[in-house]
Structure formats: C-alpha cells, structure tokens
C-alpha cells in the first residue's frame, strides 16, 4: 500500500497540530512538527548565548544538533524542551530563527531526510511549497484571526496562555505578519494545496475531509 507524504501548512492556531496528530494516528504514519524544530533551535541558541543575528553560528548549531521531534517529545542535544519551547519568549525566538535562510536550508534538508520515504504527516509553513512540493496531499489550514487567538489562549500546552485573548491575538498577528512577509519561504498557499477554513468546523470534520483526500491517493 502506498505510504503518502501529507503536507499540512497554515498559520498558528489553524488546527495543524491536532489535525496532523489525528491523521498520523489513523493512518499509522509518523507525525513531524517542523515548527518544533525552529523552536528547539531558537531555544538552544538562547541557552548557549548565541546571538540570533549570527546567522552562520545558528545554522551551525542547527546542523550539528541532535534533534528529536517525534512521539510527543521535543529534545535538542539531550535537553528535553517539550514544555520549555511553548512560551511567548520562544514564540519570538522561533519566529526570528525562521527568517534566517541558512537555518532554513539546514532544517529543510533534515525534514526531507525524515519524510522522503513517505508514511508521514509533516506540519509547518513551507512543507507543500518548499520541503515537499510533490507531496501526495497538500493542505492549507486556516481560520479567522479571532478564532485562532481563542484556540491559542485555550491551548493548555502553551504556557503563558493566561496572558488573555487580546494579548494572544496581538502576538499571533505579529508572528503571522513576520511568517507571511519574510523573504525566505514565506507562509503562502502552495500550488495544488487544498484550502480548508476551519473557523466553524469541528476538528473531526477537518480530519475526515483530509482522510478522504488521502484515501483517494492511497486508492482505497
Ligand atoms: O508552528 P509553530 O508556531 O510552532 O512554529 C514556530 C515558528 O517557526 C513560527 O514563527 C513559524 C516558523 N515555522 C516556519 O517558518 N516554517 C516551518 N516549516 C514551521 C514553522
């Protein structure tokens, strides 16, 4: 049976994580959260005192890092950072790191190595556009800015969500703007991607919709 590459892109709070995990579980695929890779690199650079404007040094760190982003655990160079990377500070560090082309090159190469044999649901911002432009299924999940802020504020995995919805909305909008307007691989609808607005959709319905697309490709 064909083991697909499924690319899930979109802004924060669109439901990528929940949908990707459910899909991977149903299909028996690996789930790879590429945002966690940018977060872990941002965390480690900060931890090691590497300034984020030293692009070559951050890229070296990303290339050499022992990085784990599967099975519900995120670890870098032996540090379990599963919880530590879900803070407003690391939101900012990751967004800055994600603007650096040399770092993107390193992480994209690693992502291709992780996913090239298929049987993978990979979520991020540039999976369908850059990492796997020939992915079997490409999805762009979106939701209204209000709904995304509401979800992020209720996300218990995200420390600092007590900040309140207004502050969360402001922070999300700043990061979205950075992700969409950066010169290196900005967040955009990839050619051939199916756009799904999840604002008024229960998560199960989103998962069913993507599963139907995947099953068409698998041929069952
Ligand atoms: O999905 P997330 O919020 O955990 O991602 C963290 C940051 O990394 C965010 O600013 C978007 C960026 N990112 C990216 O540029 N490319 C990816 N493939 C994944 C995340």
Image (cartoon, grey):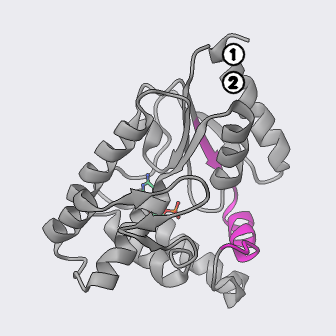
Q: Is mark 2 on a helix, strand or loop?
A: helix
Judge whether residue 148 is colored magenta: yes
Q: Residue sitting at 71 percent across and 53 percent down?
A: 18
Q: Residue sitting at 14 percent across and 66 percent down?
A: 56
Image height check: is 140 above or below 138?
A: below
**Label ID, residue 216:** 1
Q: In this view, does 71 lie to the left or right of 175?
A: right
Image height check: is 140 above or below 187?
A: above
Question: Is disc 2 surrounded by few (<14), some (14 to 19) or many (20+) residues within 10 Å?
Answer: some
* The furthest residue to the bottom: 163
Q: Position of residue 48 (x, y in %)?
A: 27, 83
Q: Residue sitting at 64 percent across and 54 percent down?
A: 17
Q: Where is residue 14 in the image (x, y as percent from the top left)?
A: 66, 55
Q: Quadrant of residue 63?
A: bottom left
Judge whether residue 40 is colored magenta: no
> Which quarter shows the C terminus?
top right
**Label ID, residue 58:** none
Q: Where is residue 1 in the image (x, y as percent from the top left)?
A: 62, 13
- Check mark 1 vs ligand 1: CB closer than 8 Å? yes or no: no
- Check mark 2 vs ligand 1: CB closer than 8 Å? yes or no: no
Q: Are marks 2 and 1 in contact (CB under 8 Å)?
A: yes
Q: List the residue tagged with mark 2.
A: 213
Image height check: is 169 above or below 198?
A: below
Q: In which quarter of the image is residue 99?
A: bottom left
Q: Is residue 176 left or right of residue 47?
A: right
Cα–Cα span, label 2 and label 1 = 5 Å
* The furthest residue to the front: 78
Q: Give the range drawn in magenta.
A: 139-157
């Amino acid at each position: 049976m064909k083991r697909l590459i499924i690319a899930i892109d979109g802004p924060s709070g669109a439901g990528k994580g929940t949908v990707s995990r459910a899909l991977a579980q149903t299909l028996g695929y690996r789930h790879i959260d590429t945002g966690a890779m940018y977060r872990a690199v941002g965390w480690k650079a900060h931890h090691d005192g590497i300034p984020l404007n030293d692009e070559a040094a951050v890229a070296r760190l990303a290339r050499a890092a022992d990085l784990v982003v599967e099975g519900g655990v995120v670890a870098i160079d032996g540090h379990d950072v599963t919880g530590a990377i879900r803070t407003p500070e690391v939101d900012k560090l990751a967004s800055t790191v994600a603007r650096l082309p040399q770092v993107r090159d390193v992480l994209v190469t690693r992502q291709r190595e992780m996913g090239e044999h298929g049987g993978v649901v990979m979520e991020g911002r540039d999976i369908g556009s850059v990492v796997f432009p020939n992915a079997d299924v490409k999805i762009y999940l979106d939701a209204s800015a209000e709904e995304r802020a509401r979800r992020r504020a209720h996300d218990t995995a995200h420390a600092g969500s007590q900040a309140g919805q207004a502050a969360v909305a402001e922070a999300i909008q700043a990061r979205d703007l950075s992700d969409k307007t950066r010169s290196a691989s900005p967040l955009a609808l990839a050619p051939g991607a199916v756009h799904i607005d999840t604002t008024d959709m229960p998560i199960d319905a989103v998962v069913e919709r993507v599963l139907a697309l995947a099953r068409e490709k698998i041929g069952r």
